Structures are given as structure tokens and as C-alpha cells.
Amino acid sequence: MREHGMSEYKRIINSQVRGRNAPRPTDPVERRELLQEMLEVFDEPVPDSLQVFDRFIPAPGREIPIRVFRHKKAPKGVPQPTIYYIHGGGYMLGSLDTHTTPLCNLALATGAQVICVHYRRVPENPFPAGLEDCYFILKWVHEEAKRYYIDVDTDRVAVAGESCGGGLTAAVSLMARDRNGPKIALQVLLYPGPMNTDYETDSYVRINHDPQFNGKTLEFIMDSYLVGVSRTDPYAVPLQAKDFSRLPPAFIHVADLDPLYDEGILYGKKLEEAGVKATVRVAHDLEHSFPRAVRVSPQARAECRVLYAAIRESLKTDPDLVTELWQD
């Protein structure tokens, strides 16, 4: 494997996490524990300038947990530009806790408030349970958040997600269009997928150096997600959609050392062909989950600055709430 900006990040992960060079276990509980252990390596305290709190949102037959990242200096009672965030984890893993540090960074560097959803995960909750949770909370953000004293400017709501959260972002965008649902100012897909069932793409075959994240891993993820589901269902497999028109503008950030590289590129191409504005940014010499590497990788920091700037421009956030995170 060639040297690149994630080398130090990977070295630290490898040195501190058990079994990092072995294939991931297939048991959901073991997979969740391993991911938690991996992602805790770079956790940082919540900064004093943010108020971070949880809510449990009532939905038919269930409650959906969310976590809110709000700027303490934001004027109370004034609707705020908002990033509605869908975390990753292969539709099976991930939680509010595994994503708190990168979401603090996202809130600080964009000046927007962030609302993250913890959707139901497979295999305990088969598709479409998780996706319906994500769509339910998108509607809640627009229609009900103010009842919880969370001020949202509904004209400035971005939906963002990384990895499978990017795939869910694409699916939620399709749902919002098809159901005449809430307005989305920007869809942000960070190294999105898997959102296809083609396991022979160039990037799946070419990028195969990580024993825990490769083509076989992604095939296992989709097999777990699509139990009893048609592999042409566009809400389950967004790249199978027949119509990409009238979707929100998109910022798609892919890593060129990621097996999912081709999926993000293809999604951007399909949007552009349908007349939707799509900006596709390639993070060169970086891998999947590169924002986790901001402490050790100048390349990752540079890419995140581009990401944050794109969101600030789209949502017209308050410059006084923006924090410069790193000095190179």
C-alpha cells in the first residue's frame, strides 16, 4: 500500500485496537464493540462553546434518539441553519457516541447547529426501519423541533451523512421528493455507500488493502441490509433509482483510496445528468473516514476545510459562530 495522509492515523489505530489487522467479526455485537473501540482513539472533550444534549423523539411504536449540537452564542429564539446528520456504520453499527467528536468539529467549523439521529439498525430491525426513522426525524426537524425549543431555519437545512449515512442521505432525499416532503437545501454525502449492489467496480477491486474494510466487507453489509428486500428498490439501493431529477443540490466528498470511491462519483454523475447541481470533491491519498484523521493528517484537515466551507456557503451561516479548528 502506498504511503498517504492516513498512514499515521492507521498506525495509531493499529497500535491501540485489538485485532485491527484481522477481518471484522460477523456478529453484530462484536462488530459494534470493535467500531466503538476504534473510534474512541481520537475522541476529544466537548468544547465549552457548544451545548450538546440528547432528546428522545416519540414516533409510532418507538422513540428515536437524537443528539443536538448547539452554539451557546447563537441567539435564543432565532431560527438557525441546521445540519441534519445521519451517522455511518454499515447500517448495523455506529451510535450517537461514536460520532460526537466529528460532529462537534462540524458544528464549530460551519457555524450551524447539528442534529444527529440514531436510527434503528440491522439485523434487529430490517429495512426499511432505519430509513423510516431518518425520514421521520427530517420531518420532525422541519415541523416539530420548535416545540422542543430547538430553533431551525427550515429554509436552511442540509442533510448530511458519512458512509452508509451518505447512502441514507441519498435515500432520504429521494423520499422527500417522492412524498412531497420537507425542503432540503443541500445533501452532503461523505464517502457514501454502499448504495449499489455491483461488487465488481474498479474501486472495489483496486482498493483492497484493509482487511476490515474491503469489497467482501461491503458485500456482507449489503447482504445484511437487504434481507427480504428487492435489490432494485431505490430507497434501499439509491443508485438503482430511475429518476434523479428534482433532488436537492449535492456536495459529494469521496476518498480515492476508498472501495466506495466509484459509488460517490457515479451518484454525482447521475445527478448532473438529471440537471441537479452536484459538486464532487476527491480527497486524494486519503481513505474512508478521513475526517477522523484531522489531528494527524494535514491532508485530512485541508479536505475538511473545503467541506466546511461548502456547507457554510450553502447555509449562509453566521461567521461569528465559526471556529477555526486547526493551525497548520
Image (spheres, grey):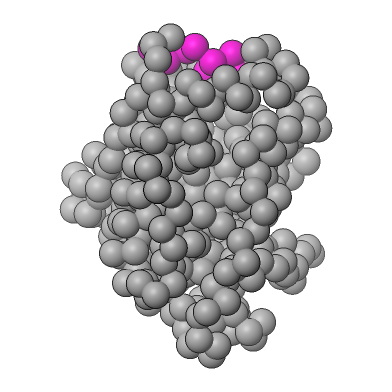
Query: What is the residue that sits farthest to the front in this orientation?
Result: 327
Q: Is residue 7 left or right of residue 63?
A: left
Residue at horizontal 72%, vertical 66%?
54
The quadrant holding residue 46 is bottom right
- The quarter of the picture where the C terminus appears is top left
Identify which residue is drawn at 24% across, 39% down. 269
> Where in the figure is residue 253, as x and y percent of width and height?
35, 41
Residue located 60% across and 35% down the image: 90
Q: Nearer the viewer, residue 276 or 109?
A: 109
- The image quadrant that residue 34 belongs to is top right
- Number of marks drawn: 0
Quarter of the image that includes the N terminus: top left
Is residue 248 depicted above or below 295 in this figure?
A: below
Residue furthest top in the image: 1
Q: Position of residue 251 (x, y in %)?
A: 32, 50
141 or 81, which lies in front? 81
Residue 274 included in the magenta stretch of the image: no
Residue 271: image location, x then y, percent: 26, 47
Q: Residue at horizontal 34%, vertical 16%?
A: 202
Residue 278 shows in this picture: yes
Span shown in magenta: 206-214
Q: Is residue 239 visible?
A: no
Identify the main secondary structure in magenta: loop
